[in-house]
Amino acid sequence: MIGPTVAVAGCALALAVAVGLVAHEWAHATALRLARVEYSVSYFPGRPDGIAALLTTRPWAAVHPRPTGREPAWALRLAALAPVVLAFPVFGLAAAGYVTTDTPVVAAAAIGWLACALPSPQDFSVAFHARRLLERSRERSASAPSRAD
């Protein structure tokens, strides 16, 4: 039988991942806002039906930058890697001695939160190819018809 500590630690892990996934996207959005890059946030985009699909497929939240092409590439790179800052509080708590193996619930929550602090492969793609994204944005804005009529 699973002990109550293990069950509570599992719930803490799941809760930390759920909150951390949204915080991950908010980190992107905050960095884009500070860099004055337009963006949109969608929650549960393209969600299929069913509880299992809700929990296991597609992102729970997504940030979609809409650069004009005039932004510096470093702004998009920093926004793509911004979720790394989510790890700082956990490392601070660990350094202060609050995250130890003696407290499995806190350790499980810290592990779940740290998992969300990792940039995704899409984040790394934006970080490495920010110039391409900006060039495509310039081309789209240059070829878009004027709406002044």
Image (tube, helix red, strand yellow):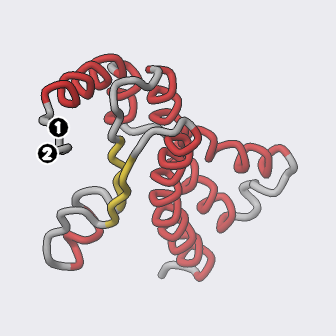
Whether residue 6 sits left or right of residue 50 in the image: it is: right
Residue 26 % position (x, y)? 51, 54
Nearer to us of marks 1 and 2 is: 2
**Quarter in which the C terminus is drawn:** top left
Residue neighbourhood size for the residue with mark 1, other residues' Cα within 10 Å, grouped as few (<14), some (14–19), many (≥20): few
Residue 41 % position (x, y)? 37, 57
Residue 79 % position (x, y)? 49, 35
The residue singled out by tag 1 in the image is 146
Task: Find residue 32 and name its label.
Answer: none
Q: Residue at x 73, y 49 (%)?
A: 89
Question: Disc 1 vs disc 2: Cβ atoms closer than 8 Å?
Answer: yes
Q: Which one is nearer the viewer's eye here, 129 or 139?
A: 139
At numbered mark 1, what does the secondary structure look like: helix, strand or loop?
Answer: loop
Q: Residue at x 44, y 29 (%)?
A: 76
Examine the rendered structure and indicate whether residue 128 appears above or below residue 89: above
Which residue type does callout 1 highlight? Ser
Residue neighbourhood size for the residue with mark 2, other residues' Cα within 10 Å, grouped as few (<14), some (14–19), many (≥20): few
The residue singled out by tag 2 in the image is 149
Q: Which one is nearer the viewer's eye here, 96 or 120?
A: 120
Q: Residue furthest front?
A: 149
Q: Which one is nearer the viewer's eye here, 77 or 105?
A: 77
Whether residue 132 sits left or right of residue 22 in the image: it is: left
